Image (spheres, rainbow, N blue to C red):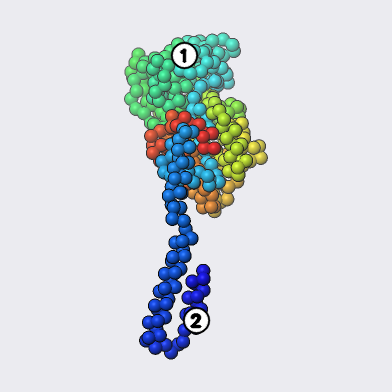
Amino acid sequence: MAAAIETKLYVTNFPSSATRQQLQQFFSRFGRVQECASNLAVAAIPEGLPIVVTVTLALGVQRMAKREAIVKKLPIVETLGCVTVICSDKTGTLTKNEMTVTNILTSDGDMAEVTGSGYDGEGDVLCGHERVTYDSHPLISKIVEIGAVCNNAEIVNSQLRGQPTEGALLAIAMKMNIPHLREQFYREREWPFSHENKWMAVQCAPKYNPNEIRLYIKGCIEQILKLSKRYLHQGAAVQLTDEKHREFMADSNQLAAKGLRILAMATGTSFEDLTYVGMVGIIDPERPQVEQAVAQLKAGGVIVKMITGDAEKTAKAIALRLKIYHSNDLSVSGEDLDHMSAADIRNIVSQASVFYRVSPKHKLTIVKALQAQGHIVGMTGDGVNDAVALKAADIGIAMGQTGTDVSKEAADMILVKDDFYTIM
């Protein structure tokens, strides 16, 4: 500072009609002043500061490792301490991703309860307190059949290979003593699940009658009902009216309000000839200590938001239990975001605590909108659909056990035991 003032005074007082010798003396002294200023600047910064900072960050990484969190880059430890918003995927992050079907609701309005958990076939399907078999209730059996055939998972020695949602559907067939149901069909074509369509379909034929072409489809109820022209009622296909559509959606909302994920089923010979047959409700328990972690994050001034592809009622029910969402809070769908301007999105993301029916592009939009407002954003997730947002966030946090390779590659930090509380 002193050197800068001295330089300013000297330049100000320098005569305008200077000789060559005077100019040489000026620049000589000016150089010494600048050298002095540089020396002062260097002296003000301790020589060992970079080493101290590096060691401190390394100790932070070591401490995180003891808590079973793998940090890929040293500066991430500092970033984690500066986070102002945590955007968390729901399934597999806030919940265990251990799916179990608890209810089956047919298009006839019959409700069945499914007991037992896991993939060992223990449990029953009960309708009116009576055990359902493959032959005793055709409509429930049709729902189970669609869920098992329109499915790519496998259960081997009580261990799941594939998606937990599909594993839950196979488990129902095992509880009804028809574990090899899928093997009774030829699969001719598959339409994989996509976040845009939100359904999966297969074209198949029963081995006992290969000429009988069937189309089985499962997915979110909004899309399945939109594609369906009819619904099964007392064994006959009946026109699906707007009134009946609203009734089925109300049934879905009742199950979703309990925190269940809803998966609807339909069948036909083509996409232009689909008949709705019913839905299943799937429970996915919350991870232990998540509620406590959310409370501590909020107490520390960190905002927590849930981002999920599930239905609104399901998302709100889980977020309410975890204290992420309160009854007066705002919730926004991915479709809502599609119809907003950039300015509206920036405004809405700061207000909403739950985002539902979102796709990977919506997750990225939310993260970038928060960053545009000056937030330091942490994103947690475990799936391929989380990878883009994990990469874009200031700190991406992936699950080590249930997380996909893509999500772990995109993340800056990996929670070895999938414990959300670790980020505390």
Tell me where residue 301 sits by quadrant.
Answer: top right
Residue 11, position as x, y percentages in the image: 47, 80
Residue lying farthest right? 328
Residues under labels 1 and 2: Cα distance? 91 Å
Above or below — where is 292 with respect to 2? above
**Residue beneath the point at 46% across and 14% down:** 121
Residue type indicated by callout 2: Thr
Above or below — where is 136 with respect to 241? above
Circle 1 SS class = loop
Question: Which of labels 1 and 2 is toward the front?
Answer: 2
Q: Nearer the viewer, residue 59 or 282?
A: 59
* Labels 1 and 2 touching (C-beta < 8 A): no
Q: Kindly identify which residue carries mark 1.
A: 121
Q: Is residue 196 visible?
A: no
Residue lying farthest bottom? 17
Neighbour tally class for label 1: few under 14, some 14-19, many 20 plus, Cα within 10 Å? some
Q: Is residue 218 visible?
A: yes
Report the side of 180 relative to 292 (left or right): left
Could you tell me which quadrant the C terminus lies in? top right
**Residue beneath the point at 44% across and 45% down:** 55
Circle 2 SS class = helix
Q: Nearer the viewer, residue 112 or 122?
A: 122
Neighbour tally class for label 2: few under 14, some 14-19, many 20 plus, Cα within 10 Å? few
On residue 418, which mark appears? none
Residue 368, position as x, y percentages in the image: 49, 49
**Residue beneath the point at 43% across and 27% down:** 163
Residue type indicated by callout 1: Gly
Above or below — where is 368 with respect to 168? below
Report the side of 410 relative to 83 (left or right): left
**Residue beneath the point at 45% across and 49% down:** 52
Residue 322, position as x, y percentages in the image: 60, 33
Q: Kindly identify which residue carries mark 2.
A: 12
